Amino acid sequence: MVAFGYEARGHGTTDVNVFEYTPDGKKVWDCWVKVPYVGMLHDFAVTENYVVLYVIPMMMDEEQMKKGGIHWSWWPGEPTYFGYFRRGGDGKDIRFIKGPERSATHVMGAFDDGKRVYVDVEMSQSNPFPFMPFHDGSRWDPVKGASYITRLSAELSKKTPKAYDIETLYPDLTGALPRQDDRYNTAHYRYGWLSCGFTENGQRGQGIARFDLQNRSYKLWKAPQGFNLSEVCFAPRSATAPEGSGYVMAVGTWAQEGNRADLVILDAERVEEGPVATVRMPTRIAGQVHGWFVPEAAIPRARA
């Protein structure tokens, strides 16, 4: 497991601690780096050889805190920073590339090919959170706050590249919380999934998309109107199944039934065909985000 903590030497510090543990809980590596400003590091990316930190202008707002407000506010017009450094080192090789105002909060997948490092994220032009304040008092913009699956990349050969690349991969689908086949974390991968929004005949809808990043295509299951989907979770068909072979699961709530929930299970390779099974729940349940599929064989058996 590779993980990180930011503001790691106390609130308002630019220190980030990155560390790696073995499955049995032994720490085998850590390092300390500094970021350009105290901005939200909601997620990070790990490839076979690199760690990537993406600093967004959801910044610590000291004046707001003194008035009893929250830690964060969005600072319009402030830059982002794409920072990367080698795994296993001391972090002194970290490079930061300055970029335009953007937000990226969840990583779908990341990899490097020796020439470039690639990070696939959900990305918006501005603050994606309608409940988070703006430093200048401006109002949330749902257009600029909409997130799209985006590929960020930077050249590895140059000492400090002048810019990192931003490529919107699927401009007709919006959404957050993308997922991949977790067996391919850090590696060059092909498939991803997303609970997403789309527009058809002037009407907004929700669904689950399967992305094929090799040919930049997607398949889409269009959920019934009034069924509001949460984050998807991928389960491989077996430990040795090919990439993307398995199931995607998501909890959805029915607005017209007092937000009663269903768990829908789709064939991950044929999401457009809709659920292969639905677990009808009798009540409303808490929103389901950041779930993880754990096969039965990986669950420790209780002692008699």
Image (spheres, rainbow, N blue to C red):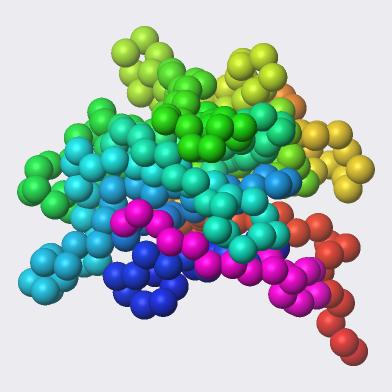
In this view of the protein, which residue sits in the foreground, 119 or 107? 119
Determine if residue 226 is in view. no
Q: Residue at x 37, y 38 (%)?
A: 98
Residue 251 or 39: which is nearer the viewer? 39
**Depth check, front residue: 226 or 19:** 19
Q: Residue at x 37, y 65 (%)?
A: 14
Q: Position of residue 175 (x, y in %)?
A: 44, 35
- Horizontal relation, residue 42 to residue 129: left or right: right
Taking the spot 29% from the left edge, 40% from the top edge, the residue there is: 79
The quadrant in which residue 102 appears is: top left
Q: Which residue sits furthest top?
A: 201
Residue 31 shown in magenta? yes
In this view, 154 is above or below 2: above
Residue 234, horizontal then vertical, whole percent: 69, 44
Q: Is residue 256 above or below residue 132?
A: above
Residue 166: x, y in percent? 45, 26
Q: Which residues are drawn in magenta?
A: 20-37
The quadrant holding residue 208 is top right
Q: Answer whether residue 183 is magenta in the image.
A: no
190 relative position to 220: left or right? right
Percent x, y for residue 230?
A: 49, 46
- What is the quadrant of the C terminus in the image? bottom right
